[in-house]
Image (cartoon, coloured by chain):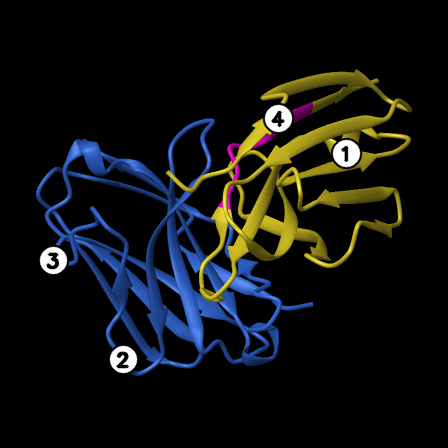
Amino acid sequence: GAVVSQHPSRVICKSGTSVKIECRSLDFQATTMFWYRQFPKQSLMLMATSNEGSKATYEQGVEKDKFLINHASLTLSTLTVTSAHPEDSSFYICSARAPEDLAKNIQYFGAGTRLSVL
Amino acid sequence: SQQGEEDPQALSIQEGENATMNCSYKTSINNLQWYRQNSGRGLVHLILIRSNEREKHSGRLRVTLDTSKKSSSLLITASRAADTASYFCATGRTGTASKLTFGTGTRLQVTL
């Protein structure tokens, strides 16, 4: 099956620092990747849609300068949380979709990154 | 909000029993999917049902879809302790194939 690797799984950082999270599709090419944020015991909220080679599309209310997304290759997308603050602490999950799954819109998820900002 | 609602929010059953969780959504859809999430982990795709289908089976999973009521149900038969997880429905809206909108989720606890 399609495997998506997300790294790191957990990060603790000081307020004001930037944190980069990587999302890799290991055995397929992902033309589209998605970044979600999940608060405890809540659902996933889509932050942005990332298409390889083009700028990410951010959801309403998500600051693009705060959450920088780069999708430089068909197997890698990165999310950088810039100048992180305690309110950015959350569980961030990426997903990837292969071209053949576009019609069904099946997404394959990474294991998530737990960000804690002190 | 376009987010769907799921009920119950939490469900606790004993191993061997069946678990039923429901999902309601708000817009026209292309299909509806169910995903499972183990605590602190990513989501795993379980099953997809198209908007023109009414019922679908996969192993111990049975999904129904009623587009007139904008609702779906997921039935897990003969539950196991390993089924303990959160279950989310996800819908893709007609005309916006890119996005999935996730429901609020049902936390299932299966005890021995």
Q: Position of residue A38 (x, y in %)?
A: 40, 39
Give the labeled residue for mark 1.
Answer: B82
Which quarter of the rendering shows the C terminus of chain B?
top right
Nearer the observer: mark 1 or 2; the answer is 2
Give the labeled residue for mark 3.
Answer: A65
Residue at 62% x, 19% y is B10
Q: Are marks 2 and 4 on the same chain?
A: no
Q: Position of residue B101 (x, y in %)?
A: 48, 48
How far apart marks 4 and 1 lie (CA) works out to: 13 Å
The quadrant in which residue B96 appears is: bottom left
Q: Amino acid at mark 1?
A: Ala
| Magenta-span inclusion, residue B9 | no
Chain A visual colour:
blue
Which quarter of the rendering shows the N terminus of chain B?
top left
Q: Amino acid at mark 2?
A: Ser
Nearer the observer: mark 3 or 1; the answer is 3
How far apart marks 3 and 2 lie (CA) works out to: 16 Å
Chain B visual colour:
yellow
Q: Return the residue nearer the eye: A30 or B105.
A: B105
Q: Position of residue B57 (x, y in %)?
A: 86, 50
